[in-house]
Image: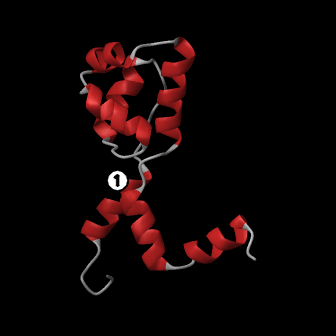
């Protein structure tokens, strides 16, 4: 039986698996920081969403790991006074796929 670490190492060596992982990735340290801050401060999702200019449904989906929009993540970070800088892995992956030549794919 494989350990989780060995299994992930083997899976991550597979380019097709990594492509799919980065395409679907929705939970990252930025998301965790946002959700942790909301919970620790006892804030209501409706209030945070309104202050950040984000649909409450999008905030709920972000918490569930089902949807992530980097612009909304940045707005939420600013609203919560968090240092949320840079891109997310999924956005970087998407850009890399659009800038690759057809021969590289």
Quarter of the picture containing the C terminus is bottom left
Residue 4 position, x and y percent, is 70, 65
Q: Secondary structure at mark 1?
A: helix
| Residue at 57% across, 78% down | 13
| Residue at 47% across, 46% down | 27
Q: Which residue is situated farthest in the bottom direction here?
A: 103
- Indicate left or right for 6 with 82 as reference: right
| Residue at which label 1 appears | 91
Residue 28 position, x and y percent, is 50, 45
| Residue at 42% across, 61% down | 22
Few, some or many residues within 10 Å of mark 1 (<14, 14–19, 20+):
some
| Residue at 37% across, 26% down | 76
Residue 64 position, x and y percent, is 42, 40
- In this rendering, the answer to whether 32 lies above or below 65 is above
- In this rendering, the answer to whether 79 lies above or below 19 is above
- Snapshot quadrant of residue 65: top left
Quarter of the picture containing the N terminus is bottom right
């Amino acid at each position: 039986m494989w350990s989780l670490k060995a299994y992930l190492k083997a899976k991550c060596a597979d380019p097709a698996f990594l492509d799919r992982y980065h395409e679907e990735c929705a939970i990252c340290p930025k998301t965790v920081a946002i959700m942790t801050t909301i919970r620790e401060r006892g804030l209501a999702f409706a209030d945070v969403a309104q202050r950040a200019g984000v649909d409450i449904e999008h905030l709920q989906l972000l918490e569930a790991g089902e949807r992530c929009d980097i612009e909304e993540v940045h707005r939420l970070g600013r609203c919560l006074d968090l240092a949320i800088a840079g891109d997310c892995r999924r956005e970087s992956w998407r850009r890399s796929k659009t800038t690759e030549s057809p021969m590289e794919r």
